[in-house]
Amino acid sequence: MNPVFYFLLALTAVLAATANAVGPIFDTDGDVIFGGSSYYVLPAIWGPTGGGLTLSSLGDKQCPLYIQKEDSEVERGIPVKFSNWKPRVGFVPESENLNIEMDVAATICVQSTYWWVAPSHLPIMTFFIAAGPKPEHGEDSSRTFFQIKKTGGFHNGYKITFCSGDGGCDDVGIARDANGVGRLAVGSEPFPFVFRKASEAETSHKTIPTFYFVLALTAVLVTSTHGAVLDIDGDTMFRDSYYVLPVIRGQGGGLSLRGRGGIPCPLDITVVRATICIQSTYWQVGEFDEERKKYFVMAGPQDSGKSFFQIQKSGDDAYKFVFCPPALETGCPRCRNVGIFEDEIGIRRLALTSEPFLVVFKKANVTEISSKTM
């Protein structure tokens, strides 16, 4: 048979295979993105469109966490990893179903951080992207498949789409929640992204941002004289969120949460980490610690007998916390100062002490409290 025929047949097969082959996704350096590596998801247009992606709670529920977009363009957020695509290729393929996971060491919700489309509980049907467990075989994982596609045009970036089990795909964009926080949501205007590779140093210690513990003031924290508590700007404090900072600089930072004695839960209030305990974080006084001979202030569910504190003035520019349990038969509550106890490994914890811990309050802005979870 004519050799030209075989040549044309082979050429046709090659062209057909090429047409059906999957293409790779590229990062900002023009390198192919591979599975197992971590990448920041950043806006294709740098500037007022904000920064990368992070995790935060939605509304008054601590878990699950939702994918949030950083407001500041200088914040890269938390990198992501890709997995579970069907084509047998080592690189991350374009326009193929895959799973996306936030590459973070630990969160307040003790579970993995794979992307899931969450049900909508709002009057307006908004399907936000939440962090959830790793999809397993036999489980309904139809809400975990996404695709990465080129946007085209001048953006020179990619978009992420959610592809349900019926074969249809919807764009993933940015939608504002009830508090004005930008979050990833299905059905929004597609948002063009680029992928920037995260270095090993950046991902090896990556956690949800460690921060000075933000104290959400509620009715259980009131002044003993019913006068207004003022923040460091001299403004009256309302039922809002504030940092609790030492009145004297150089004596440590704000407040955080940490386990005690090798037991991860419950958590103590410490002077400046990430909580792994699925619980509320109301202040309460714990049981007497026989080893350390102290009553520590812990985080836990609201308890009417152990959760009553007051904020009292101490001098001209400082305040102190006191623990005031409900009045006994005498009719008078016995209030005790909340101070600092340094344990055997140097961790400074809040405890009932004779010497009070003098503090000031700095208001936390909306951006800080919406993007910072333990």
Image (cartoon, rainbow, N blue to C red):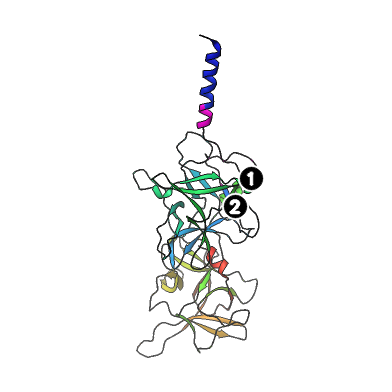
Q: Label 2 to label 1, Cα distance in Å?
A: 10 Å
**Residue 271 can be seen, yes or no:** no
Q: Mark 1 points at which residue?
A: 28
**Residue 52 can be seen, yes or no:** yes
Query: Which amino acid, by three-letter code, is at mark 1?
Result: Thr
Q: Compared with residue 286, is residue 119 higher up or lower down, i.e. above or below?
A: above
Could you say where residue 304 lies in the image, as x and y percent from the top left? 38, 78
Asked if the residue under mark 1 is in contact with the one under mark 2, i.e. CB atoms within 8 Å, the reply is yes
Tell me, yes or no, whether the highlighted magenta stretch contains residue 25: yes
Q: Compared with residue 157, is residue 290 higher up or lower down, i.e. above or below?
A: below
Magenta span: chief secondary structure: loop
Query: Which amino acid, by three-letter code, is at mark 2?
Result: Leu
Q: Mark 2 points at which residue?
A: 42
Near mark 2 (Cα within 10 A), the count class, few <14, some 14-19 or many ≥20, is: many
Q: Which of marks 2 and 1 is nearer the N terminus?
A: 1
Q: Compared with residue 165, is residue 66 higher up or lower down, i.e. above or below?
A: below
**What span is colored magenta in the figure?**
16-38
Near mark 1 (Cα within 10 A), the count class, few <14, some 14-19 or many ≥20, is: some
